[in-house]
Each structure stands twice: as structure tokens, then as C-alpha cells.
Amino acid sequence: MEVLREKVEEEEEAEREEAAERAEKVEKTRPLETQKENTILTQEMLRDLEKKISEIEVPIPAEPPTPAEAPAPMEPLLFTKDIIDTSNLPLSYKTNTPKEEHLLQVADNFSRQYSHLCPDRTPLFLHPLNECDVPKFVSTTLRPTLMPYSDLYNWDDCAQFVSDFLTMVPLPDPLKPPAYLYSSTTVLKYQMGNCFDFSTLLCSMLIGSGYDAYCVNGYGSRDLCHMDLTREVCPLTVKPKETVKKEEKAPPKKYAIKPPRDLTSRFEQDQEAKRREAIRAQEEKLRKEEEERLLNAEKAKPDPLHGLRVHSWVLVLSGKREVPETFFIDPFTGRSCSPQDTRFLGIESLWNHKNYWVNMQDCWNYCKDLIFDLGDPVRWEYMLLGTDKPHLSLTEEEDEELNDDDDVENLGKEDEDKSFDMPPSWVEPIEISPEAFETRCPNGKKVLWYKRAQLEKWAPYLNTNGLVCRLTTYEDLECTKILEIKEWYQNREDTLELKHINKTTGLIIDYFKPGHPQALRVHAYKSMLPEMDRIMEFYVAARVDGLVKREETPRTMTEYYQGRPDFLSYRHINFGPRVKKLTLSSAESNPRPMVKITERFSRNPAKLADEDVAERTFLITEERIQLRYHCRSDHITASKREFLRRTEVDSKGNKIIMTPDMCISFEVEPMEHTKKLLYQYETMMHLKNEEKLSKHQVWESELEVLEILKLREEEEEAHTLTISIYDTKRNEKSKEYREAMERVMHEEHLRQVETQLDYLAPFLAQLPPGEKLTRWQAMRLKDECLSDFKQRLIDKANLIQARFEKETQELQKKQQWYQENQVTLTPEDEDMYLSYCSQAMFRIRILEQRLNRHKELAPLKYLALEEKLYKDPRLVEFLKVFS
């Protein structure tokens, strides 16, 4: 590197000398009078110059718009080496290994050859300085890492994470690559970086995930380099294309009624069509003019540095990870782009963790015509021989000529291996903590401006209401008039997922995930007051009544059902004006008067079509009931009935008798039993009961609407968030329970330590309190304790022996019983006998093992107790002589 520094100093010295010589030549070529005028100025000349300067108007720049008015440009952030703490960095950041020094020499040699062969090309971006002012080769700055999160396994998730996690810092000089290229660990620590830092981190993650990814040093448009998205449409506003399904026309029926003959004038139809066509053409012309005007307003100003702005992005080649075709990734936005994108103006070089390639193709047509076959040495000049890219195959003649030439040149020379492997990365392993991965954006928030839209992102649990994303759409380019707002939520206890607010119409639509107490799926409303325009959709599987949708207006209510046992699919209610004033409990204390109830039913295959009701209407104020039955498959009309509902008794208390004029029928296939008054009377009485039931159900629906509205108001005020039991930091209940359990365990441990078994305690209690021990008493305590322990060991052995003998005797008795009654036993008795024998043998074996173990350990326990007594601090002074 000393050679490189000396060379740089020599080049700078030569440039200074050339500049001085040029200045002298220019000065000599000037006329003598001009030189004198430049050196000597009179008072009049000074006054004229002052007057001219005073006449020059300096334009005062207008105040920048506020973020609420328009997308203000992002203030340039400072991310320099001075703010980086290098004291705790490892040794690999501060020094170079011999292999890295060798690589830098190879890179210098490659750079000199490249500058000599391509003097019109810009210098290569090979070994910038790191945060410790140490030159590092760009390939060694990549650290392939597979993240321990399943969400960062695919390229789109990795790109979106890098885009959200880091803050963009523009290049110090837009025309040159940066002089410093920091490690990915430093970039992650400070959460900011330029395009090269973004690409290095993203490429390291993609290579670790198995992609064939490369960092690119090239040129981009101004919007791409500055991350200016104000002329791009927000991805969240793009609606997916809806596939239009072709409706299959039903085959015409054999006995279908022919449509009436069209008697309208064709001349009038043609004139009307011409008039509509002229109006349509005029509207299309106005629309195109408006679009052209908007395009001119949105068109970017010409960039004086177009084609010169340096930018870095990521190239992903096809092949690995089932990538079908090559594509670019813009690290600032995390989006994939085609090589045909005109924002990518050209490529100088690219690299991965194994090699470095220089683009030798012409970029006059941007990157559209580039061929990304890195094994082609004509199009891509590689630096190291040890590349994993296959070389192009040569013909046999060229191969023989090359072999002959090599044989002549290498005659008498030893073969030398000129391959050089890339040294390992000097960067520490890339680690992202779970807290940082969850927080994503710097300080938990990020704001992006798009064309007529603003996108805001927050980390989960940062907002108390669970808000994680908000998209604000504007009507104009200046972003002053709001059209609509979309808010996404997470971890809400009320399962609210999305809130869509239309500022033009005032309509609010809430979308819920499964799990709401009222099985609510969608709630569209303009006001939370009852008996207003609203639409409620429900999760059918979570409701017993099969309600799918409920539409409500101040005077109507419509309900849609699915999968009910009574085949009800539709109910529409018309309400009359309320007598009393509307209150919150109006539906319960003062329900709206019902005027009309219309119900529709699906086809019940268990009934005949003429007896299966398709629609029934209760005209409550007119005291009439209308029925329409299902139509048979071989008919074109359906049967109908209308009942005149009267009270069962008149004003005098006399019972009213069913008369034929109380039922008006139209039957396609008249039947005898339907003509009888008894059948009509029974049908009318059944319909009266159904009307009462329908009224009650409508009243319950009104109560349910009030309950849902009250619940939604409480949920919006509380907006409680759910916390997983595995989230030990946020879950206060789990944290308190865990701390309580730890406290109980600690107290139990202390109690066990305090109440440890003391063999001398019962014997010391026999002595008078406060009396000092004597040698004779100490000896007596030791002997009594040992004899007592010995007796306990003997008793335990006797107890085990007694249980063993008892089990053995019972087994023998059972075996004797089996021998005596073996002939008369049933298979069930034999199975019980075998089961008993198996269990008894198991108990006998265990008791035998315990007895043998006790006999082995009893002497050892006795000696251990004796040693413990000799070392007991209360007896050690008196038993020293005997130990």
C-alpha cells in the first residue's frame, strides 16, 4: 500500500504542475492591455461595477412546504466516520492480514492495467476505506449470512426489511463512488447508510439465503439515486386486475314466451347512437387533454447530471433458488426491477464474495442489451482466476493454436499456479436481535411520499391503538386535499385489521379478522348513532342464525342468511315514523313501528314446489299476508295466495268465521285440499304465528345492532392490545406470574435450608434449657443418636421384609386357588388371574430390590452419621479424644 500512496501523491503533484503551466500559458497569450485592465481599476470603473452589481436581483427561494401541504424533500443526514465509535471494533477491522495485503496488490495491478487499456473509463471501485481508515477490498466486505428468521428467507422479504430498517443517506459526491464503505455490522448499528451500504447488506443476506446475488456499481436516474418516489404510484393503491367471468347463457326453454316485437324507429336509434358517439368523442378528447396536462405537470425537470450519477443496487442472476430470470433490486425501496428499466443507466462493475467483474459492454441503450454471462471474458473482465463461472468453450482449431503458442512461450519454464482465492470476510457475523427485527424502522417509524400518497409505517406495539401502517391518498400533486385514508392495525383485542375512511363521502369501513365477539367481519357506516345508514357483514361459521349481511337505513333493514334449517335467505323490513324521540335505547323501550316484512326462502327439496313458499310478505298496516310459491321446472308461472288477516273476534265478542273472500288464490295446478276453508284457515293461523315470530326476530335484530354499536364505541375508546404469552417483556400477567413463582421457589429453598434434618434436635430437647454439655452427656447423646438411627434402619428393613413376605404369601394363595378351580374358570377369570400374577410379581421384584439396596446402604449411612456427629460443632470439643 505504500507504493499505492506514493503513486497517488505523484499523480496529484503532476496535476498541480500541469494546472500551473496552463495558467501561465493563458496569461501569456492575453494582450498586454487586457492584463493591465485586470490589474488597475479606476474610480469610475469601480462605481460602474458597483451600480451593475446593485441592479442584479437575487431570487429569494420560497419557503419549503410543510409535510402536511406537500412532500418535503428529505433532509440529508450525516453519516460520517466521525460519529462511528471504533474503540470496540475487533482487530480484523483495524488491520489487514498478509492475504488481504496480497489481494490489495493484485487489485492495484488490475487497476493499473485497466486504466492503461481503458483510459476513458472512470477508475474502478476496488478498495475503499472502512470505518477504521483501513483499505478493504469490496468483495471481502460482503459477509454471507443466513438470518435465523423465517421471514427473511426469500429475497422480497430481505429487500423489504433492509429498505425499512435503514435510513437513506445520499452520496457525498453524486458523481463518484464513496471513499468509505462501512461494514454491515456498523450500518445495522446506526441504521443508516448510502446506496453502497444498502447493497452490501442486502447482498450479504441474499447470498446467505442461497441466491446468486451481486453488488453493482453503476449509474442511475436522479429519482433512483435520491429515492424520490413522488412520481411513482404507491403499490398499496394499485388494485389487482379482476378476472371477468363470462356468464354462461342458460339454454332457452322449449315453452319460453317470445319477447314482444321491437317497434321503435331504427332511424331514431341511429341518430341517438350518433349523438352519443359525438358526446363520447368530445369527452375522450377532454380526457386526453387533461391527461396530457397532468403528465406535463408531473414530468420531471431535465437533469444536468443525467447519466453521471453514481448508484449501487443488487443483481440477482437466474438459476439458484429457482429464479426464472435475471432481475435488479433497488435497495432503497426493496422492489424488483427488470434490466429493461430505463432508470438504470449503466454498469461499471459488479462483485460478490468470490470475485470482481468489470463490464466491457456498451451501455448506450441503458442496461437493456447487457448480457449477464459472467463466464464470457469478452463481455465481463474478471479480476481473479479462481472464478466459479464457466468460461466460453473454444473451437478445436483455436484451442490447438493456443496450446501451440503456450508450448513455445513456456518452453523451459516451470508451470506456475496463478490462481488466487478470495480471503474470508473481515466483517463480524451479521446479527439482528429480535427487538430490532420487530422494530424494523429507525425509532419505529418511517414515512414515504408517493405520487398523491403518503405511506407511514410504525413498529408493532409502538402506538397504543395498534396502528402499524397508514396510507393517505390525496387528490392533487401538492398533497393538500385528502381523498381517503387507510389504516392497518395489529394485535387488537377487537380483531380490527383495517379501517378505510373516505373523506369525500364520509364513509368509514372497518374490516375485522375472525374472532370478534359478535362475529363481525365488515362494518360500513357514516355515523355510530343507531338507525343510520350502515352495512354489517358477519362470519357465517361463527353465527348460529346464519346471518351473512345486514343493511340498515333510517326506514329499512335488510338481512341476508345462509345455511338455515328453515331455508330463510332474505328478510326486508320497512319501518314507519317513530312516535317518540330517538334515544340510545329506542329499540328496546320504543321500537320502530313495522309497516312491511318481506321474507324469501330457498328451495326445500323435501316439499313440492306448489307447497314450498318462495316469498312471503306481511303487510302489517294493511292486515294482509301475501305468499308466492316456487315455480316448477316445467312451468313458467308460480302459484300465489293472499290472506286478509282479521281479528279472531269482532267488536261484540263474536268469533269470526273463515269465509272464502278472506283468501285469494292463483294456483297453477289446483288441488282439492287447497280449496277447502279448513286448509286456508289453518294456513292463515300458521302465518299469524309466523308473523309474530318475524316481528320478534326483527326486534332482536334491532337490539343486536344497538349492542354492536355500544361494543364498538367501548372498543374504540379502550383499543386494548393482545399480548402473546410467549412475549415475556410485554406480557405483564405472565411476568408477574413468573416472578411470583420464582419468589415462591426461592422462599421454599430457604425454608428447606433452614429446616434441614438435625439428628441431635430430639435428644438435645431432653436436656434442661441453658445447661452446658459435659463430656459424659456428649458421649451419651452420640450413642443414643446412633442407636436410634440403627433401630430405624432395622425397622425399615423389617418393614420391607414383612411386605415382601405378605406379597409372596398372597401370590401363593392365589396360585393354589387357581390350581383348585382351574377347570371351572371362565376366560375372563383367567385373564384377571394372569393380570394379578403379573402385578404381584412386579411388586415382589421391586420389594426384593429395595431390600437388597437397603442392606447395602445401611452400613454406609450408619458410618456417615457417625462421622457427621464427630464433626458436629456442638460435640466436636468433647469427642476429640475418641476420634
Image (cartoon, rainbow, N blue to C red):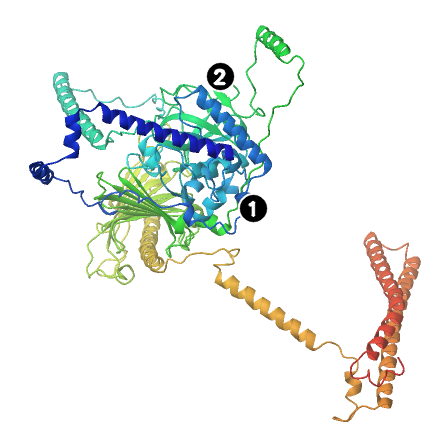
**Front: mark 2 or 1:** 1
Q: Position of residue 63 (x, y in %)?
A: 19, 46
Tag 2 residue: 378
Give 133 or 736, whichever is nearer the viewer: 133
Per the rendering, the mark at residue 632 is none
Q: Is residue 337 visible?
A: yes
Secondary structure of residue under mark 2? loop
Q: Position of residue 574 (x, y in %)?
A: 24, 49
Tag 1 residue: 91
Compared with 188, 34 (above or below) is: above
Q: Quadrant of the C terminus?
A: bottom right
Please tell me which residue is depicted at 82% across the width and 54% down the height of the picture.
831
Give the mark count: 2
Report the side of 417 relative to 365 (left or right). Answer: right
Give 755 or 444, whichever is nearer the viewer: 444
- Residue type at mark 2: give it: Val
**How many other residues sit within 10 Å of disc 1, few (<14), some (14-19) or many (≥20)?**
few
Report the side of 703 relative to 267 (left or right). Answer: right
Q: Position of residue 750 (x, y in %)?
A: 65, 74
Residue 9: image quadrant is top left
For marks 2 and 1, the one nearer the N-term is 1
Q: Residue furthest top?
A: 397
Give 337 or 719, whichever is nearer the viewer: 337
Report the side of 682 relative to 756 (left or right). Answer: left
Q: Is residue 429 visible?
A: no
Compared with 90, 804 (above or below) is: below
